[in-house]
Amino acid sequence: MSATGTAGDVSAAATDYVVANAGSYTGAGEEIYSAATGKLLTFASARGLDPRSVGGIDLVAQQRSLEADTGQFVDQSQWGDYSNTLGQSFGIIGLERAGTDPTPASVDFLLAQQCDDGGFSLEFKDECVSDPDATSTAVQALDLVGGHDAQVQSAADYLESRQDGSGGVGGGATTEGVNANSTGLAATALRIAGRDDARAQALAYLDTLTFGCATPALAGAVAYNQADFDAAVAKGATAAPDGTITRSTAQALLGRTDQSYATITSAGQSAATPTTDCAATTPGGDTSGDSGGDTGTGDDDGTGTGSDTGTGAGDGDDASTDQPAARPEIPAVVQTDGVASTTPVWALGAGTGLLAFGLTLVARRRVAVRVR
């Protein structure tokens, strides 16, 4: 929400909750997690908080204390070290945004995770296996510290190679299928690298997963993948938001703005939350399948997945009376740089969930469950 420059009141309330629970998120005492610390440090700067006093925690000092001699940010935990490249990138972003230069060793350690194909490995292992989410986050960190254009462009080459015909990008081993989360992250990295065509394809994919007024409680939201989208549309007016949709919407939304984890700010954020108007639908229309809207990939024969003729198997005739429900009237999003965008925002039901996801930022993957 901060990236769109809207919903300031909701963002402020959610920020208060995050601050009050900071210690339970990053850990405390003998149990402190590096990725969570880096994410909360990034969050603090994005929300205009003092990074040296968030819920009584000096996050700058805590992040520094977790850096090993190699430059790696490591967990301090009785359950072992589960640090990864996502956490390394957020540690660098968080320190840089807090006005404290990350050490050259920490940046070099991140650079060492870049594989031969240009992507970045998620896990710190001898075998380098590129991961799209780790790559997209590393691009943001390297762009912020500067001086690594060649590595950023190589990473963008890898991300483009991971796009399928829909423009979407899949994740790593646990999220391999094309999805909105990985595509939203990639859209941000592709914008940073100046890959406008590839980014446009990624945004077009996100459009095909954006709900319309056939699912009023989800209007403007973005499904995680095509299967989830189809399942929700099949429920029609009874479809309701859940945690997966909230997270995928938040990550897709950031990719649609001109912001990144390195630049997002609450400065200039308006208090009001945008609303949708699902009353403005086509009278007597077929509300069973409105989905991708005008930006979908359907063909003139009406058999596509989001064309002007809807998602049914119509004949594509402009005079057809089998019309889908209209897209909701959604206000333009105001970017934090003052530039207006027509990107839809899921404001109904998002509330605290979107900003809470701003805290987690990217799901913290684990190869094992840590008992806490």
Image: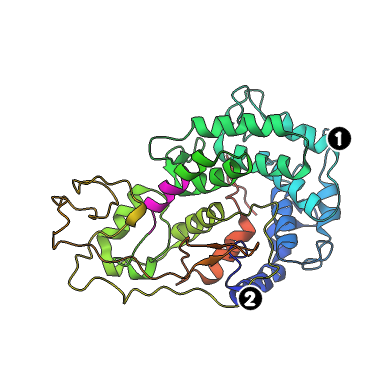
Mark on residue 69? 1
**Pointer 2: what residue?**
13
| x and y, in percent, of residue 278 in the image | 34, 73
Question: Would residue 76 be seen by someone viewing this image from the given angle?
Answer: no
Report the mark closest to the observer, 2 or 1.
2
Please name the residue shown 38% across and 66% down the image: 219
Res 128 → quadrant: top right
Q: Is residue 232 visible?
A: yes
User: Up-down: is 148 above or below 349?
Assistant: above
Residue 57 magenta: no
Residue density around tag 2, few if under 14, some if 14–19, many if 20 or more, within 10 Å: few
Q: Nearer the viewer, residue 79 or 314?
A: 314
SS for tag 2? helix
Front residue of this view, candidates 80 and 113:
113
Left or right of residue 122: residue 67: right
What amino acid type should be assigned to the residue bearing mark 2? Ala
Question: Which residues are the magenta region?
Answer: 202-210
Q: Nearer the viewer, residue 192 or 114?
A: 192
Q: Is residue 223 above or below residue 70?
A: below
